[in-house]
Image (tube, rainbow, N blue to C red):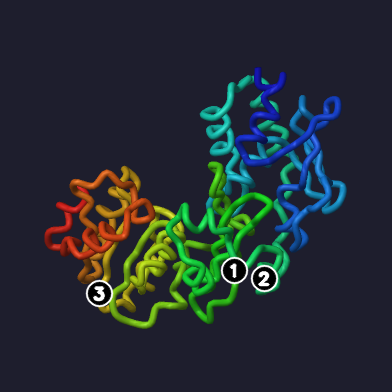
């Protein structure tokens, strides 16, 4: 069951690679960057395979398996603390859970939890640990050009084969953190944990005026730039905050090109209602007849075709219902 060997599986699901020595699982500290401003290059972190208790002897990060899940998956309460119930639900849905053991974990986590200290200050130098250019195979897989990646400040983590897309403050565009997304695995993470990505838009520093195209993924915005379609911004996901909606008011024309899935359609329906209340005129990408999930998957000629066929908000329901 859960306490008898599933801990390593949970870590694998979280994207944490470990090696086992007896009852201890050893690996790179998953919160080293947030606490110290640099990656853990020498395995400094260990977790007990039976109890789930973990500790980094270098930076001092410690806790239980439940707090680790909450912090890695960024499950937080309104007060900014780990949402243990959300972490428990994630475990319930992703591993075979021994509920008696999980209840003990939950109680121990609540009694011993100490929030992660505020991350060290952000500077452009924090991105210097990543490669400035992604390899050709990764660019080709996403349909991106090197010039577009440089324009957007996109980096590459060669250790994890993942994309690094900066998150910048909308006022002055100072670096707040970044989003990391694997090209080869289902790995996705925001750095530092809890970075306020909902208060900004990826690519906003490049937007001057005219048409703004809103997409979910930063890499889809880079894809559009690669095709010579400029003015794309990303919301870093399907949810669009009030802060982001206010930033969109800078556009002369606003096109929502959310993903062609349940979450994307829900977001489009929500934006249709909210923009009408705000008195904002906008258009919606019409995916009808398309087998593609998002702009990132489309060949160039279809990107132009579907953008040109975007539906005005008066007829917006036809684009996603």
Tags 2 and 1 in contact by the CB under 8 Å rule? yes
Compare marks 3 and 2 and give the one earlier in the sequence. 2
Which residue carries the number 3 mark?
253
Q: How far, Cα to Cα, is label 3 from label 2?
A: 33 Å
Judge from the rendering whether residue 200 lies leftward or rightward of residue 156; answer left or right: left
The residue at 58%/51% (across/down) is 189
Circle 2: element type: loop
The residue at 80%/53% (across/down) is 41
- Which mark's residue is nearer the viewer, 3 or 1? 3
Residue 167 at x, y percent in the picture: 54, 66
The residue at 55%/27% (across/down) is 92
Image quarter of the N terminus = top right
Q: Is residue 38 visible?
A: yes
Which residue carries the number 1 mark?
176
Judge from the rendering whether residue 194 lies leftward or rightward of residue 263; answer left or right: right
Q: Which mark is residue 285?
A: none
| Residue 174 found in image quarter | bottom right
Residue 266 at x, y percent in the picture: 29, 48
Which residue carries the number 2 mark?
122
Q: How dense is the environment of label 1, judged by Cα within 10 Å: few (below 14), some, or many (20 and up)?
A: many
Q: How far, Cα to Cα, is label 3 from label 1?
A: 28 Å
Circle 3: element type: strand
Q: How far, Cα to Cα, is label 2 from label 1?
A: 6 Å
282 or 232, which is in the foreground? 232
Vertical relation: 128 (above or below) 164 = below
Vertical relation: 267 (above or below) 221 = above
């Amino acid at each position: 069951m859960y306490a008898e060997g599933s801990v390593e599986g949970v870590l694998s699901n979280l994207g944490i690679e470990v090696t086992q020595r007896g009852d201890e699982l050893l690996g790179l500290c998953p919160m080293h960057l947030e606490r110290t401003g640099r990656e853990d290059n020498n395995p400094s972190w260990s977790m007990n395979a039976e109890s789930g208790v973990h500790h980094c002897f270098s930076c001092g990060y410690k806790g239980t398996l439940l707090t680790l899940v909450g912090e890695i998956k960024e499950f937080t309460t309104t007060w900014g603390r780990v949402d243990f119930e959300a972490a428990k639900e994630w475990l319930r849905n992703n591993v075979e859970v021994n509920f008696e053991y999980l209840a003990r974990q939950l109680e121990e986590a609540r009694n011993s939890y100490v929030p992660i200290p505020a991350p060290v200050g952000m500077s452009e130098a924090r991105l210097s640990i990543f490669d400035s250019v992604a390899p050709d195979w990764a660019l080709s897989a996403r349909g991106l050009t090197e010039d577009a990646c440089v324009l957007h400040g996109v980096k590459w983590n060669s250790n994890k084969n993942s994309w690094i897309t900066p998150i910048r403050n909308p006022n002055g565009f100072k670096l707040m953190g970044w989003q990391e997304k694997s090209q080869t695995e289902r790995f996705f993470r925001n750095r530092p944990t809890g970075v306020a990505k909902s208060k900004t838009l990826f690519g906003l520093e490049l937007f001057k005026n005219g048409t703004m195209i809103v997409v979910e993924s930063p890499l889809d915005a880079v894809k559009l730039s690669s095709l010579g379609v400029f003015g794309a911004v990303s919301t870093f996901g399907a949810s669009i905050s009030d802060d982001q909606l206010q930033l969109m008011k800078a556009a002369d024309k606003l096109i929502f090109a959310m993903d062609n899935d349940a979450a994307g359609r829900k977001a489009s329906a929500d934006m249709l209602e909210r923009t009408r209340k705000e008195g904002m005129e906008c258009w919606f990408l019409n995916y009808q007849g398309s087998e593609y999930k998002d702009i990132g998957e489309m060949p160039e000629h279809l990107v132009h075709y579907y953008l040109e066929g975007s539906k005005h908000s008066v007829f917006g329901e036809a684009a996603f219902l």
